[in-house]
């Protein structure tokens, strides 16, 4: 016995696939409620030329952390990479250039790892915190010191 598609079965199938396509395409544009975050970082009174900044969530309910590069003392996370509401621990790093620390490279030795010039109180043992708030601009400026104070 041959199976014959009836007109209403074809119509039902077309409607189903059209609905499925619309549902897949319709999602919240920013489901985590990410907000832009920006600011400046200075080190010993001068803009930090290069480095990284990382925001790690302190809230048990949040698993979204994010980081970005620091260039000429500025950083920015746009809405698509931004942070949801909450409190975050901030870690800032800026390793010295390998070439600056060892101008003569010896190919028989493995290259030296760059030395971190930012004190640990601003990165691995950071006590810097920020709170992302929907009611105010999330602009955070950090003034770091080589003495760690």
Image: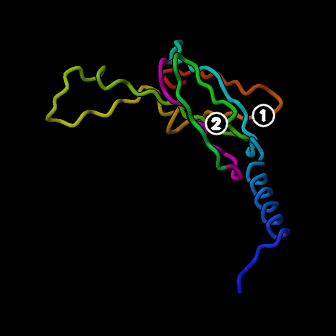
Task: Give the side of residue 53 with respect to residue 61, left or right.
Answer: left
Residue sticking out furthest to the top:
46
Depth order, front residue of 17/41 = 17
Label 2 Cα neighbours within 10 Å, binned few <14 / some 14-19 / many ≥20: some
Q: Position of residue 148 (x, y in %)?
A: 51, 26
Give SS at disc 1.
loop
Query: How far apart are the alpha carbons under marks 2 and 1?
Result: 16 Å
The residue that appears at 65% across and 50% down in the rendered structure is 63
Is 52 located above or below residue 44 in the figure? below
Residue sticking out furthest to the bottom:
1
The residue that appears at 60% across and 35% down in the rendered structure is 90
The image's mark for residue 81 is: 2
Range shown magenta = 49-62
Is 62 located above or below residue 14 in the figure? above
The residue that appears at 61% across and 37% down in the rendered structure is 55
The image's mark for residue 133 is: 1
Is 23 located above or below residue 78 in the figure? below
Is 61 located above or below residue 103 in the figure? below
Query: Would you identify the image quadrant in which residue 139 lies?
Result: top right
Label 1 Cα neighbours within 10 Å, binned few <14 / some 14-19 / many ≥20: some
The answer to if 57 sits in the magenta stretch is yes
The image's mark for residue 121 is: none
Q: Is the C-beta separation of discs 2 and 1 under 8 Å?
A: no
Q: Position of residue 119 (x, y in %)?
A: 47, 29
Q: Position of residue 11 (x, y in %)?
A: 83, 64
Depth order, front residue of 121/102 = 102
Task: Give the side of residue 120 with respect to residue 133, left or right.
Answer: left
The answer to if 67 sits in the magenta stretch is no
Q: Nearer the viewer, mark 2 or mark 1?
A: 2
């Amino acid at each position: 016995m041959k199976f014959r598609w009836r007109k209403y079965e074809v119509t039902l199938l077309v409607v189903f696939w059209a609905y499925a396509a619309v549902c897949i395409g319709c999602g919240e544009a920013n489901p985590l409620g990410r907000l832009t975050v920006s600011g400046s970082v200075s080190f010993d009174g001068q803009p930090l030329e290069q480095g990284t900044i990382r925001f790690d969530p302190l809230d048990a309910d949040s698993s979204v952390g994010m980081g970005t590069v620091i260039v000429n003392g500025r950083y920015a996370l746009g809405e698509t990479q931004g942070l949801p509401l909450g409190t975050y621990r901030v870690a800032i790093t800026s390793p010295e250039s390998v070439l600056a620390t060892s101008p003569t490279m010896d190919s028989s030795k493995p290259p030296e790892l760059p030395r971190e010039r930012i004190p640990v109180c601003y990165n691995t043992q950071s006590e810097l915190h920020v709170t992302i708030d929907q009611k105010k601009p999330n602009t955070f400026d950090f003034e770091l010191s080589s003495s760690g104070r």
